[in-house]
Amino acid sequence: MPANKNLLILPGDGIGPEVMREVRRVIDWMDRRRMVTFNVSDDHAGGSAIDTYGTPITDETMEKAKAADAILFGSVGGPKWDKLGFQLRPEIAILRLRKELDLFANLRPAIVLDPLVDASTLKADVIRGLDIMIVRESTGGIYFGEPRGVESLPDGQKRGFDTETYTTSEIERVSRIAFELARKRQNRVCSVEKANVMQSGLFWRQTVTALQAREFPDVELSHMYADNCAMQLVRNPRQFDVIVTSNLFGDLLSDLASMLTGSLGMLPSATLGAIQPSGKRHALYEPIHGSAPDIAGKGIANPLAQIMSFAMLLRHSFGMEEDAALIEKACVNVLRNGLRTADIMAPGSARVGTGVMGESILRELDKLAA
Ligand code: NAD
């Protein structure tokens, strides 16, 4: 088959390159076994780009990112680069990618895999089978709204302020993604805001309601206040299918939801942009964990979040649902066989390093595809 799927891989720093190596083995396996060929290009981002090029991400890398069909990102940062100036922070790489590619919808699945049901701090009965998708608006809202600042008041005090702002199109484009995702899942969207105390929250609710009536009457829509949603996520998280919310509330709720699953090394994410006139959608996939400098170079990092980020890439950028599900199944089977990296170690399991975890996934893929 021709290599018509252009993939840019940016492993980054710390454990990024270690866990990305295991994804490369999965890609090679797909090349060999499934007759899917990717046109893969690699580059530096973050601290490794500062060391190589003197900047967290070069204009050339940005051009490659714009031309790619999808970007697989590792993680950036570490103590080595902590003392550099504001413009040389490794995180600039990811911020610039999000901004220039207009990646406005952050998708965070919170899935409890059966073999890890005891890794959560919540009771197994509450989270068994959990499968939520949180869609967070990620380029607007109070983190970017103007005016913002700190001003001096006549009485000698100071006043700090930020502005929550959303336009109709900003709300509609992220909600559209949530409704489209729901159609492929349990067909339910819960829109979360504070319509009771915020004008922008009430506007969010009205806009989502109108969009659903106009374009998605087949999808069930409910509304919830953000504070109640936080409580419900801990009390009864399985009531949710897809949650759509603003940047600020999504930041809090997606962290809360991801911890229901118990481990940072297990959690993938996607950030999607608008569909271009060419029909292509910019998209970046990354694990939610950072570069874990405390364990970098030791060969013990859990590669599953990075591998499952690749599975999300196959599903959302290339429509390769079957292949994505195959990779996810291989991950579950390896865990079911009792293999664990240190971060998810449990009594009675076998502790393995990054490379053995990766190899075991390839073996499971062999079995599943036989
Ligand atoms: P972190 O996610 O890197 O690590 C938190 C803890 O989880 C550490 O104890 C680490 O060892 C463990 N951990 C994380 N991923 C793991 C994995 N795959 N397998 C096993 N254990 C894992 O968060 P941090 O320590 O707050 O940040 C470290 C660096 O990463 C900082 O420079 C931070 O800025 C950066 N960071 C980058 C991103 C990103 O690139 N998107 C995200 C978060 C943090």
Image (spheres, rainbow, N blue to C red):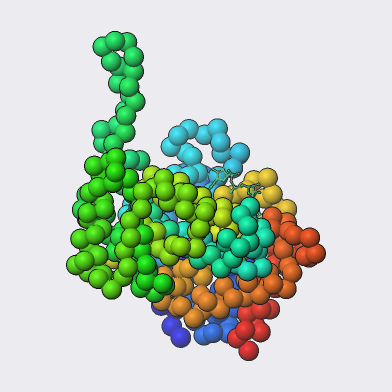
The quarter holding residue 265 reads bottom right
Residue occupying image coordinates x 33% and y 40%:
142
As rendered, which of 102 and 288 lies closer to the eye? 288
Report the label total: 0
Residue 176 % position (x, y):
29, 64
Side of 342 where 225 appears, left or right:
left
Identify the residue at the far top of this view: 155
As rendered, which of 75 and 202 lies closer to the eye? 202
Side of 158 where 70 appears, left or right:
right
The answer to whether 84 is drawn above or below residue 333 in the figure is: above
Residue occupying image coordinates x 30% and y 21%:
151
Residue 114 % position (x, y):
63, 69
Identify the residue at the far bottom of this view: 370
The answer to whether 77 is drawn above or below residue 303 in the figure is: above
Residue 159 % position (x, y):
32, 22
Side of 316 where 80 appears, left or right:
right
Residue 99 visible to an observer of this rendering = no
The answer to whether 164 is drawn above or below residue 129 in the figure is: above
Side of 14 where 89 appears, left or right:
left
As rendered, which of 334 and 282 lies closer to the eye? 334
The answer to whether 163 is drawn above or below residue 208 in the figure is: above
Residue 207 visible to an observer of this rendering = yes
Q: Quadrant of the C terminus?
A: bottom right
Residue occupying image coordinates x 25% and y 47%:
202
Residue occupying image coordinates x 79% and y 60%:
347
